[in-house]
Amino acid sequence: MMQNKHDQIEHGLQSAGWLVQNQPDADLQASLGVVVRDYPLARNYGTIDYLLHLEGKAVGLIEVQAETTALTGVPIDSEKYNRGLPFTLRLFTRPLPFLYQSSGSAIQFTHTFDPMPSPRSLCGFHRPETLRAWLEDSMVGETPRDMAAEYFPEHRRRGRSFHERVLINMPSLVTDGLNAEQIKVITNLETSFKENQPRALVEMKSGTERTLAAIRFLERLVQFADARRVLYLVNSADIGQRLRKFIQDTLSLDNNTPFTQSCPTQHLTDDRLEASARLCIATLPQIYTLLVNQDPLEENKMSKLKEVPPFPYNSTFPIESFDVVIIDTCNASITTYFRPVLEYFDAALIGLTENPTQEAIDFFNQNLVMDYEDPQSNADGLNVISFD
């Protein structure tokens, strides 16, 4: 039986660890995350379809839309949700920081702590633990949202969200050991991230030069923007092993220590993410089979599919598992065939390719941040070892 939109929304919430209850009998202490249906607003503003609570305090909402309505995200300056919140409502900050809009089959999310809040599409809801961690990054006690970054130095330095940390925390690039093309790649990617572009495509020949540029960029994201975890997708397990060996032999730019010391790396071969891992290496088929909880598909079965079929939310690998996903050797077949996998995570996507196709450029929202200019690949003394 086909679920209606409210059933779909509540199933998604429950899958992500939320407890859904009715108003006025809700027990806000029954779980870390409690969602209250049809919460009444003040001043004749009606109701909130779903009001999200953490530790008994309101932190966000879900606005339900019809299936036929194009989702544009909840306006952060909505009079209904700003003026309509009862003064007796316990909350961490006003306005509410986490705004979802859903038709059941689609979800838009706006994080109001971002410096340029804009809705982004999700395939599920974030876990209560994730929103709690974002609040801890963003707040001092119950300090109002508009004062947290302005008056508290520790938050001005740290930033209230991943996007804000990219904007304010990235120091000048240390260019030692980097050639002109690598410097351009890293600089253009950082500019794209600061402009809040969710996807970016890089055109550059494969080999250690491209790999090193990607490693240096993600090193900066981890060290200065506190990217919690990055996924690096490769074409095969063998390439993944060689990539991990390359990373193990790479030194950090800032203190000349092994890169893996500041960025613990996991070659994702089992069904669990290591808590300490900041960088995970895997193939797309590996990620797909982990997400759908099944053995790897036989190649002849996969070749008969035009694309991998949609799959449900997997609580073992929640959508917020990665802040950034890097797709090596990204082409039209990957962005078409594995599109549901690439769009499962609530993460910024970076594609690396030698020959960008129009399909790949379209997938990355026309954001081709680097055109290959035929540099002399051995000019900087690096041996080009292909990871293709």
Image (tube, rainbow, N blue to C red):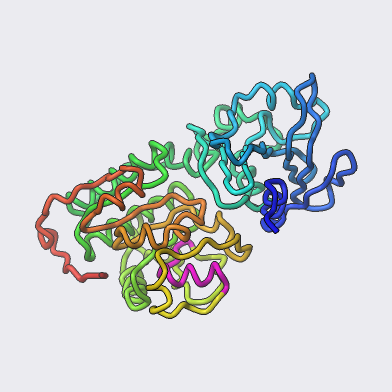
Give the image location of residue 281, x and y in percent: 42, 68
Instruction: Give the residues in magenta.
Output: 278-293
Using the image, determine if residue 72 lies above or below residue 126.
Answer: above
Residue lying furthest top: 43
Does residue 352 show up? yes
Q: Nearer the viewer, residue 152 or 190?
A: 190
Does residue 113 show up? no
For residue 24, side relative to residue 1 (left or right): right
**Residue name at image x 47 percent, y 58 percent:** 340
**Residue name at image x 55 percent, y 54 percent:** 320
Using the image, determine if residue 191 lies above or below residue 387.
Answer: above
Give the image location of residue 126, x and y in percent: 62, 51
Q: Nearer the viewer, residue 373 or 63?
A: 63
For residue 166, side relative to residue 141 (left or right): left
Give the image location of residue 235, x and y in percent: 33, 70
**Residue name at image x 55 percent, y 63 percent:** 311
**Residue name at image x 74 percent, y 33 percent:** 48
For residue 348, side relative to residue 379 (left or right): right
Residue lying furthest right: 25
For residue 296, side relative to residue 53 (left or right): left
Q: Nearer the viewer, residue 180 or 316?
A: 316
Using the image, determine if residue 124 lies above or below residue 117.
Answer: below
Position of the C terminus by quadrant: bottom left
All told, the count of numbered labels is 0
Based on the picture, tell me whether residue 140 belongs to the magenta stretch.
no
Name the quadrant containing residue 61.
top right
Give the image location of residue 24, x and y in percent: 88, 38
Q: Nearer the viewer, residue 288 or 183?
A: 288
Position of the N terminus by quadrant: bottom right
Name the quadrant containing residue 147.
top right
